[in-house]
Amino acid sequence: MPHQGADFAKAEFHTRAAQGDTNLNREALNYEGALLECASGSRSAVGKIYAREKDQLRAVAHRIVRDKSRAEDVIHDAFAQILRYAKNFDPARGSARGWIYAIVRNTALKVQENARRELALEEDTLNAICEREQTVPNPASCILDSMALRTMLDQLEPNRRASLLLAIIDGRTHEEIAEYLQVPVGTVKAWIRRELMAMRRRLE
């Protein structure tokens, strides 16, 4: 993961400003050492960084995405990147803590940009599939459609199938489905949107 000079410097500035005097009352953490441990695959080192910085990093993410669930997704994705790319950290470019904040900030910006592009799941997309079963004038056609729906659902990966059934049958929200399946909310939204659109195209 390449460094981004301006973002890195900006993150370093905000890191120092956010740090304030709070660290005076806390045991010092060697961030460079922690990143070296991360580079060797140490999850405990990631845990140390998370325990120390989670609240401030979450606040940084929330200021950008302005949504609690998306901010949590940002933190999850960012720490996966920290573990994966720690070997690329270059102390000559700035502090380890600033590098960590830069990753969170850049991840949040990407999530926010993706959210702008994401097509909202419209209610009529869900209703169109349900109504097709309820209002088809030809009973034989209705049976065929039901069989087609069942076949399409059976062909889906289990989590994708579960997300559709939980949304359509149980009326669960995206957040509830994400919590149940233990995946990010954005992933649930993408699954439901893509599979509904694909099913609708096949039925038509």
Image (cartoon, rainbow, N blue to C red):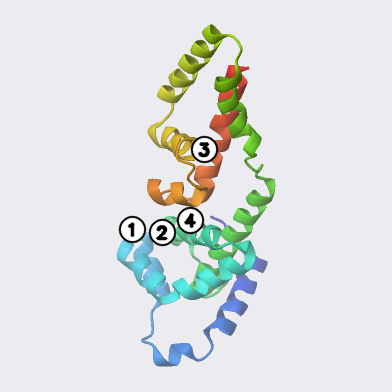
- Taking depth in this image into account, of 116 and 136 the one nearest to the observer is 136
Q: Residue drawn 39% across and 88% down?
A: 26
Say which residue label 1 marks: 41
Disc 4 crowd rating (10 Å Cα; few below 14, some 14-19, many 20+) is some
- Answer yes or no: do the residues labelled 2 and 1 have beta carbons within 8 Å? yes
Say which residue label 4 marks: 77
Disc 2 crowd rating (10 Å Cα; few below 14, some 14-19, many 20+) is many
Task: Determine whether, in the image, residue 33 is placed left or right of residue 81.
Answer: left
Say which residue label 3 marks: 191
Give the SS element for disc 2: helix
Say which residue label 2 marks: 83
Quadrant position of residue 92: bottom right
**Image quadrant occupied by the C terminus:** top right
Q: Is residue 30 above or below residue 179?
A: below
Give the SS element for disc 1: loop
- Taking depth in this image into account, of 19 and 167 the one nearest to the observer is 167
Which of the two discs, 4 and 1, sits closer to the camera? 4
Whichever of callouts 3 and 4 sits on the residue coming sooner in the sequence is 4
Residue 3 appears anywhere in the view: no
